[in-house]
């Protein structure tokens, strides 16, 4: 029964203690009971009074009623069943390197989910985070994975951006809109505590963006203090799209099918078509025909 699921409200005071400077990374944190769309609300507020929203600032809603996705898609989740937040950032990188932003946000979410929930989260290019299907059954376009997280990046004046993240946390199967979706609870997460996840997610994202900014937006040169791989390689390592057979619906209404073999210097998805031609996909809807293979970085 869905009414037996524990879905406590977020504790604004506890989140402020963990996330606001000087203890945490944020300059401002607003926790609201309800938002139509945290992205739409934050974009509007930061555009109206930019000085009141220094970067990084976070808006998080206990319940989002009209979430925004790519291509104008909208959705609604049961109250307190999801974690919906939007982070205002100032990337400070050249414009041609901004396409890395949703991929780096995805990397941050993947790392947070893996560390907090114990689940083997992966990234689907360019802005979805997936979890292995609990039933192991393939779904067309997604293979043996299900979507648990959506990411939406929107630009603002002055080079700033809003990074929206929506995580399915405790939804039951009948509360999800499509068979290709899942939630942390359905996937067997070690915890579904939204506050714990939010603190980890924000921390990872701010650290990753600091390293990216420090390398002037060059994801192949950006490294974090732990001396791990560069950020471009780290993204490729968790991106299940790379190494997969894919079909891509391009923005010009044409299609492309082939093997995704790497990521370009600007985060483009590199696809080798069946006729041998190579394509750098900047934007498009990707469907996985077959997953697997090795991730590489291309020119």
Image (cartoon, rainbow, N blue to C red):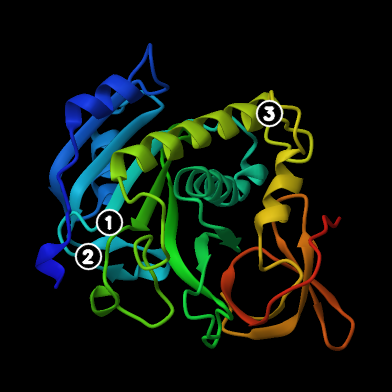
Q: Residue at x 59, y 51 (%)?
A: 103
Sort mark 3 into few (<14), some (14-19) or many (20+) by Cα contacts within 10 Å.
some
Q: Position of residue 185 (x, y in %)?
A: 34, 62
Mark 1 residue element: strand
Mark 1 and mark 2 lie on one chain; the one further toward the N terminus is: 2
Tell me if I can see residue 194 in this picture.
yes
Where in the figure is residue 205, as x and y percent of width and height?
A: 51, 37
Between disc 2 and disc 3, whose residue precedes? 2
The residue tagged 1 is 82
Asked if marks 1 and 2 touch (Cβ < 8 Å), the reply is yes
Instruction: Name the residue tied to disc 2.
Output: 77
Distance between the alpha carbons at the discs numbered 1 and 2? 7 Å
Whether residues under marks 3 and 1 lie with C-beta atoms below 8 angstroms apart, the answer is: no
Position of residue 266 relative to residue 136, above or below, is above
Q: What residue lies at 26% left-to-right and 71% top-to-bottom?
A: 172
**Mark found first going from the N terminus, 3 or 1:** 1
263 horizontally vs 123: left or right: right
* Mark 1 Cα shell of 10 Å, populated few (<14), some (14-19), many (≥20): many
- Can the viewer see residue 52? no
Q: x%, y% of residue 164?
A: 38, 49
Query: Measuring 73% from the left and 66% from the top, which residue is drawn there?
Result: 242
> Is 23 on the left or on the right of 97, as rendered?
left
Identify the residue at horizontal 58%, vertical 59% (top origin): 123
Indicate the quadrant where residue 254 lies.
Answer: bottom right
Kindly state the secondary structure of the residue where label 3 is placed: loop
Foreground of the two, 296 or 132: 132
* Residue highlighted by disc 3: 224
Which type of secondary structure does the marked residue at label 2 adopt? loop
């Amino acid at each position: 029964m869905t009414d037996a699921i524990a879905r406590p409200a977020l504790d604004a005071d506890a989140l402020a203690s963990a996330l606001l400077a000087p203890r945490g990374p944020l300059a401002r944190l607003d926790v609201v009971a309800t938002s139509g769309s945290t992205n739409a609300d934050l974009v509007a507020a930061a555009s109206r009074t930019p000085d009141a929203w220094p970067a990084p600032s976070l808006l998080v809603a206990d319940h989002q009623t009209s979430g925004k996705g790519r291509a104008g898609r909208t959705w609604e989740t049961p109250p307190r069943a999801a974690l919906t937040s939007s982070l205002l950032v100032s990337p400070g990188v050249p414009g041609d390197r901004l396409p890395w932003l949703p991929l780096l946000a995805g990397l941050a979410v993947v790392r947070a989910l893996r560390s907090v929930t114990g689940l083997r989260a992966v990234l689907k290019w360019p802005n979805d985070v997936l979890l292995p299907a609990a039933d192991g059954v393939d779904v067309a376009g997604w293979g043996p994975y299900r979507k648990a997280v959506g990411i939406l990046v929107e630009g603002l004046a002055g080079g700033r951006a809003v990074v929206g993240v929506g995580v399915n946390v405790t939804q039951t199967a009948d509360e999800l809109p499509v068979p290709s979706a899942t939630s942390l609870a359905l996937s067997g997460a070690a915890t579904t505590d939204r506050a714990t996840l939010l603190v980890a997610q924000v921390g990872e994202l701010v650290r990753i963006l600091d390293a990216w900014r420090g390398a002037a937006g060059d994801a192949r040169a950006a490294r974090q203090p732990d001396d791990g791989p560069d950020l471009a390689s780290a993204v490729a390592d968790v991106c299940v799209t790379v190494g997969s057979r894919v079909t891509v619906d391009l923005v010009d209404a044409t299609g492309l099918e082939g093997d995704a073999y790497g990521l370009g210097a600007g985060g483009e998805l590199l696809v080798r078509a069946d006729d041998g031609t190579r394509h750098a996909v900047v934007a498009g809807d990707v469907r996985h025909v077959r997953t697997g293979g090795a991730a590489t970085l291309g020119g």
